[in-house]
């Protein structure tokens, strides 16, 4: 790490590292966000989303991120979160879809609500 890198905020350096060293995240339609990077406590929290949510290799990706960042001298703890895709949809017990259509009707919904008709501009 160069002298100028040490002067940059930890969060910015982690974000840059993710973009440079983990292009697979974006290549597979995923997203990454550094939620916390505190040089005082040494804690880094990263959240993966998009295509990472529900991806079968997300465990490998999170493990690689954790293994690499824990080697940084100012990092003592790394947490990488990948939300369960069912959580964002309300889980299997959710009565409605995220579009507000009753799933018991096979997702057809009300024709009038999705098709305003010929008088609608």
Image (cartoon, rainbow, N blue to C red):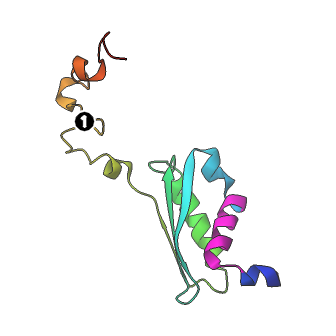
Could you say which quadrant of the image residue 20 lies in?
A: bottom right
| Rendered location of residue 119, percent (x, y) | 30, 11
Residue farthest top in this picture: 118
Our reading of the magenta stretch's main secondary structure is helix
In this picture, residue 16 sits left or right of residue 25: right
Instruction: Name the residue: 34% across, 50% down.
Output: 88
Residue farthest bottom in this picture: 40
In the image, 84 versus 59, the foreground residue is 84
Relative to 85, is 34 above or below? below
Instruction: Name the residue: 66% across, 58% down.
Output: 22
Residue matched to label 1: 100
Residue 111 within the magenta-colored segment of the rendering: no
What SS does tag 1 mark? loop
Instruction: Name the residue: 65% across, 51% down.
Output: 24
Look at the image and give the residue range highlighted in magenta. Answer: 8-20
| Rendered location of residue 86, percent (x, y) | 33, 48
């Amino acid at each position: 790490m160069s002298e100028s890198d040490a002067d940059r905020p930890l969060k910015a350096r982690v974000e840059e590292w993710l973009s440079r060293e983990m292009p697979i995240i974006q290549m597979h339609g995923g997203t990454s966000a550094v939620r916390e990077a505190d040089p005082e406590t040494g804690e880094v929290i990263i959240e993966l989303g998009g295509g990472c949510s529900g991806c079968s290799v997300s465990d490998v990706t999170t493990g690689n991120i954790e293994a690499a960042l824990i080697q940084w001298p100012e990092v003592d703890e790394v947490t990488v979160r990948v939300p369960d895709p069912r959580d964002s949809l309300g889980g299997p017990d959710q009565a409605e879809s995220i579009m507000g259509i009753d799933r018991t009707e096979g997702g057809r919904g009300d024709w009038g609500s999705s098709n305003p008709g010929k008088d609608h501009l």
